[in-house]
């Protein structure tokens, strides 16, 4: 299932990914730092949702209170909650 998330407090404008049985694939960031976000997307492709959340949650960007990777963790958390509530 495809999820789209509008991040808050970061340069990227949108994060999307597919989730299938707890596995995250096809992570895409719109906006933000292209080189870093492309690498994050490649490295995390095929990981379990919980492992991505653990690795990404709490990472900060400069003086911001979040980062694109932290926002990805939030997006995955919301996607998992949505999956639990619908099924």
Image (tube, helix red, strand yellow):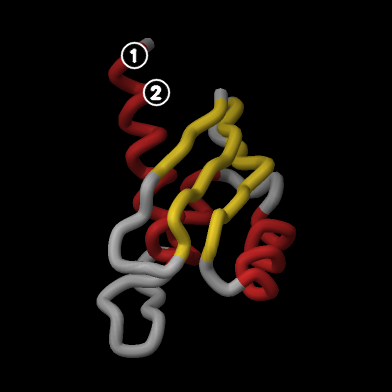
In the picture provided, is 68 more to the left or to the right than 45? Answer: left
The span from disc 1 to disc 2 (Cα, nearest Å) is 5 Å
Front-most of 34 and 83?
34
Q: Residue at point 34% right, 26% down? A: 82
In the picture provided, is 35 more to the left or to the right than 22? Answer: right
Label 2 secondary element: helix
Front-most of 31 and 23?
31
Q: Quadrant of the N terminus?
A: top right
What numbered label is drawn on residue 54?
none
What numbered label is drawn on residue 86?
1
Quarter of the figure with residue 21: top right
Q: Is residue 63 above or below residue 12?
A: below
Quarter of the figure with residue 59: bottom left
Front-most of 26 and 21?
26
Q: Residue at point 69% right, 64% down? A: 38
Q: Residues within 10 Å of mark 2 (few under 14, many from 20)?
A: some
Q: Position of residue 62 (x, y in %)?
A: 37, 88
Label 1 secondary element: helix
Q: Residue at point 64% right, 48% down? A: 47
Check if mark 1's residue and mark 2's residue have beta carbons within 8 Å.
yes
Q: Position of residue 15 (x, y in %)?
A: 50, 49
Quarter of the figure with residue 8: bottom left
Front-most of 29 and 80?
29
What numbered label is drawn on residue 83?
2
Q: Is residue 58 above or below residue 21?
A: below
Q: Residues within 10 Å of mark 1 (few under 14, many from 20)?
A: few
Q: Is residue 36 above or below residue 56?
A: below
Q: Position of residue 78 (x, y in %)?
A: 33, 39
Q: Quadrant of the C terminus?
A: top left
Q: Position of residue 51 (x, y in %)?
A: 52, 54
In the picture provided, is 58 more to the left or to the right than 40? Answer: left
């Amino acid at each position: 299932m495809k999820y789209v998330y509008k991040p808050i407090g970061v340069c990227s404008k949108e994060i999307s990914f597919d989730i299938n049985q707890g596995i995250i694939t096809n992570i895409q960031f719109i906006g933000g730092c292209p080189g870093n976000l492309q690498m994050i997307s490649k490295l995390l492709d095929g990981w379990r949702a919980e492992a991505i959340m653990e690795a990404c949650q709490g990472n900060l960007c400069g003086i911001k209170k979040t980062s694109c990777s932290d926002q990805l963790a939030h997006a995955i958390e919301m996607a998992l909650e949505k999956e639990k509530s619908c099924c």
